[in-house]
Each structure stands twice: as structure tokens, then as C-alpha cells.
Image (cartoon, helix red, strand yellow):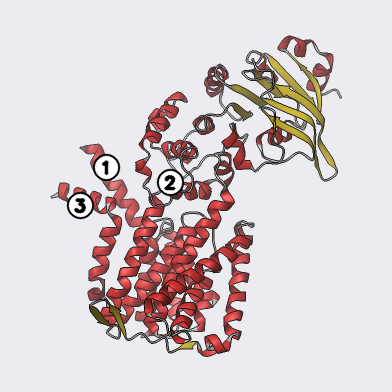
Amino acid sequence: MKNSIISLLLLARRHRVATVLLFLLVFPFLMPYDALSVNILIFGLYAVGFNLLFGYTGMLSFGHAAFLGVGGYLAGIAVVHGGWPWWAAIVTGVAASCLAGVVIGYLAIRTRGIYFSMVTLALAQIMYYVFYKAEDWTGGENGLRGVRVESIKLPGLSIDFINPLNKYYVILVFVALALWFVSRILNSPFGAVIEAIRENEKRAAACGYDVARAKLLVFVLSAGICGLAGALRALHLSIVPIDSLHYLQSGQAVMMCLLGGMGTFFGPFVGAAVFMYLEDVVTNLTRYWMGAVGMVFMVFVLFFPKGIWGTLVHQMERWLRRQGDRA
Amino acid sequence: MSATPILEVRSVSRNFGKFRALNNISVSFRAGELTAIIGPNGAGKSTFFNVISGGVPPSEGQVLFEGRDITGIAPHDFARIGIAKSFQITNVFKQLSAFENVRVALQMRVTRFQLLRPRQAYGELVQRADALLARVGLTASRDKLAGDLAHGQQRSLEVAMALACDPKLLLMDEPTAGMSPEETTVMMDLIRQLAAERTVILVEHKMKLVMGLCKRLIVLHHGELLVDGNPDEIRANAEVKRVYLGQS
């Protein structure tokens, strides 16, 4: 019995993307309603993309809403103003957020620590006002309405995209691909380089790594993944709300990462799920849901600094090591 | 022995604001030599070390490596052309295992921006990392986090990381700083072994330590080159006695 648990855990650890995917396949049936599952899926991806920069490279960006927003708006504009198909909208959203990542990243990586956070925040605020003012294109305060995608047409197949469960699985395809991509990056030599940079920039440079270039690359990758989350959100909501670009959205990414466990593969996703689930449940009880979420957040930051998932993984690793020593 | 020195410093000065930390220093190092830069506190040793290892560019003058001007090249280029260093304050990747520290350092010569191939595909790095850990006596601590190692072990780990890029020139800034006498002995033995196979320049505060180790010593004082000679010459030099006894 115990041995099969051990081998199951080892298998799950070796094939983390497949394990996560299995879980996400049944996930909607564990949630009170499907739209919440879709939201969690999207914000889970957003937090995972953010974590690549924050948890793995040690760069605390306070401006990641820019990429969620740019991805969303450009995907939305492609549909509303361009009349483009859904897939072209996604490509546009991701490409635009990567481009925004190059510009913001190029300017921000010259700074470190709190200055980096402030520069990303400031640049993201500029994005907010640009999109806010470009009313003809973005709908300004009201958000960009009419991002209508009623069905996903593939050769020989048409999926009704109004049904939230269908929506969930369509979006899951993209989220799964992105998670696979992130997992590959983390497991690659480049993944080792960004962790080295997080641990000690000076040493990483002395080892021969071009720190600035690595930082810019990871910044753009992170922006692209968050942009994908934004584009998927636009298709999901049929509207791009201006709050996509709001700094609170940037803050949420930080909270989700810390809550779930920064620097772990799946932690940010768990953090996003808990965050959004709490938001959903507590809003029904009181307007002050932020207070409740804040309390939970404080408990974790103070007593479980590794986060929910981080703590679980840590315990599991310890248990596995003990079992290994005993054997 | 080739005529071109492995490292040549030509009239190098370095200012920090109005303070002149290094003043017009010219010195060259032959390949295969083990040299120590010594001097009392504030002599400019660390600045000199930084200038030749990519920490800070010189304000004036040139640094040549194997005859090639390397003044002002990026810090990461030093490792690529064959100059590696260990810092005065230990710089290791604390949350990574000792093994991973060395593996990452080795990886630089093979791949830097490979995004999609798994690390496991570079199997030869694993053997080479283990060999380097064995070399500095850290095999037993292979899987410990670098941050959990004893101070002396972290310094040894840093030497292993510096060796990972197979440098022609190894620079060490106070390699025994903060070490216990036992750890110091181990480190001195290691330096002796390393010096047999490559050029080593070390910066050291404790003169006694390097007297028995190096054939050539360079004494800095107030940012200037005071004496350059073998241990006997240094010992006999009245100037050196004066600055080291602090009667300046």
C-alpha cells in the first residue's frame, strides 16, 4: 500500500504536467459552477506566468496587469474591429503582450529590487491610461464590448463556445500547452540559469551568463504567458474590462503566487484557485470579501511562507526522503 | 614559455569620486605563475582585483589578457575568455544544491539559452560536476543546499564553480577569509595543487600565509605598487616592514 503511494507520488513528480492536466480535467466537477472554473483556469495561468519571473528569477514585477490587459485588449480588438477568427485573436494578444514585454522589460531590467517593482508599476500605469484614453478602440471606461465568439470552428468540428463547460475545455487546451511550455523552460538549462540569477546575480555573471539578456528573455516569456491568459479571458468574458490593466490586477498576481507558493511549478495555480474560490464564496456573505482573503493571506505569509502548495510539496519531499532512507 | 604575458596591466588607475583607489599601476603576470597581491587594509587590493576580474572597469589604463585588450568588457565575458574568480565574500547559489551550483557553472560552456531541451540531456555535465566536487572535497555534501554548508565548504564550492569554466587564469580574493586554521590549511593545499596546472593570482591580507606559497609577491600601498619581488626580497624590504607595522 505504502509502496504504491510512493511510486504514485514519484510518478506524479516526474510527470507534473500530465498530473496537473488530469486534475484540471475533473476540476469543473469540483467547483460550484462552471464559470468559476474557467476564471480559475485563466487566473491560474496568469499566476503561473507571473511566477516564472517572480518565483524563479526573483524579479518582483508590480506591473503584470499590463500583459494581462494588452493580451486581452489586442485579442478583443482583433475580434471586434478586425473581425478576425478566435485563433487569430489569441495569436495577436500573445504577440502584442510579448512586444509590450520587450519594451517594458528592456526599460525595467536596468533596475533591481524595489526600483524594478516601481518601474514596472509606473510603465503598467502608462499602459492603463493609454488604453483608457483610446476610447474609439478600447471603449475606455466601459471596457471593450462585443468580443463575441459563439463557436469554435475547427475543420470538421464546431464547438458551442457559449456553454461554459465547453469553454472550459477549449481554454484548457491552451492552458495545458502553456503549462507544458513553462515546465519545459523550468527543466531546461535556461531554467537553471534563471534560478542561478535569482540566487546570486553576481555569481551568475562571473559564471559567464549574460544576466541582462537572460532577464529580458524571461521577462518576455512571462509577459507572453500572462498575455495568453488575458486573451483567453477576453474570449471567455466577451468583454475586456478596463480593470484588466488596473494595478490591483498586478497585485493579485503577487498574492496568488505567495498564497500558493512562489517558485513552485503548480503553487501559483493553487493560489489563484483558493483566491478566486474565496472571493466567490465570501462575496455571497459580505461585501468585505477582501478582508477575509487578506486574513487568509496573512496567515499563510506569517506561518506558511512556502504557501499552500509549497508547504505540501515540502512535506511530501520530506516524507519521500524518509521512506527512501528507511528502505 | 611564451613571451606574451597572460595578464598585463598598463598604467591602470581607478577613481571613486575624488578618491584615487589605484594610481598608475603597471604590472604583468607570466603564464603558470602563482602570484599574491598583498598589502595592508585600504591598499587598493580589492579594487585591483575588481579591475582585473571584471568587477569595475579602470578609470585610466588598459588591461590585456594574452595580449588582447580586455579593458571594459562585460563581466560575463571574463568567464568566457578564460578568467574565473572567487569572491572575497562568498557568492554561491544558496538555495540550490552543491551539485547544482557546479552543474550550472559548467553548463555555461555547453549551452546558455537552451529553452526546451531537458537538463538531463546534458549527461556529461553530471559526471564533470561530480568530479569537480570530489576535487574540492565536497562529495559527501553533494545534495545539501549550498546555503547549509559550513563557511569553509562554501568557499571550496566557489572554487569548484570558478574551475568549472576551465579558466586559464584563476583569480582569488582572500580565499581563506573567515576560515578556521584547519580549513585554511585545506584551502592552501588546494591552491598549491591548482597553481601546478594554471595561472593563479590571489589577493591576500595575511602576508604570512602567502610567504610560503607564492614565489612572487606584489605589495600595494595607498593604491600604488610598492614592491614586486620574491618572498625573501619582500621580507628584507624596509618599506614593506614599515607599512605592515603601520608606522606610516
The amino acid sitting under disc 1 is Arg
Q: Residue at x 76, y 32 (%)?
A: B44
Q: Residue at x 32, y 65 (%)?
A: A176
Which quadrant, please, contains the C terminus of chain A?
Answer: top left
The residue where tag 1 is placed is A322
Q: A94 or B151, which lies in front?
A: A94
Mark 2 vs mark 3, CA separation in Å: 27 Å
The residue where tag 3 is placed is A8
Q: Earlier in the sequence, mark 2 or mark 3?
A: 3
Check the residue under mark 2 and report the chain it is in.
A
Check the residue under mark 3 and report the chain it is in.
A
Q: Position of residue A65 (x, y in %)?
A: 51, 72
Q: Position of residue A264 (x, y in %)?
A: 39, 56
Q: Position of residue B8 (x, y in %)?
A: 72, 27
Q: B78 or A203, which lies in front?
A: B78
The residue where tag 2 is placed is A189
Q: Are marks 2 and 3 on the same chain?
A: yes
Q: Residue at x 30, y 69 (%)?
A: A173
The amino acid sitting under disc 3 is Leu
Q: Are marks 1 and 3 on the same chain?
A: yes
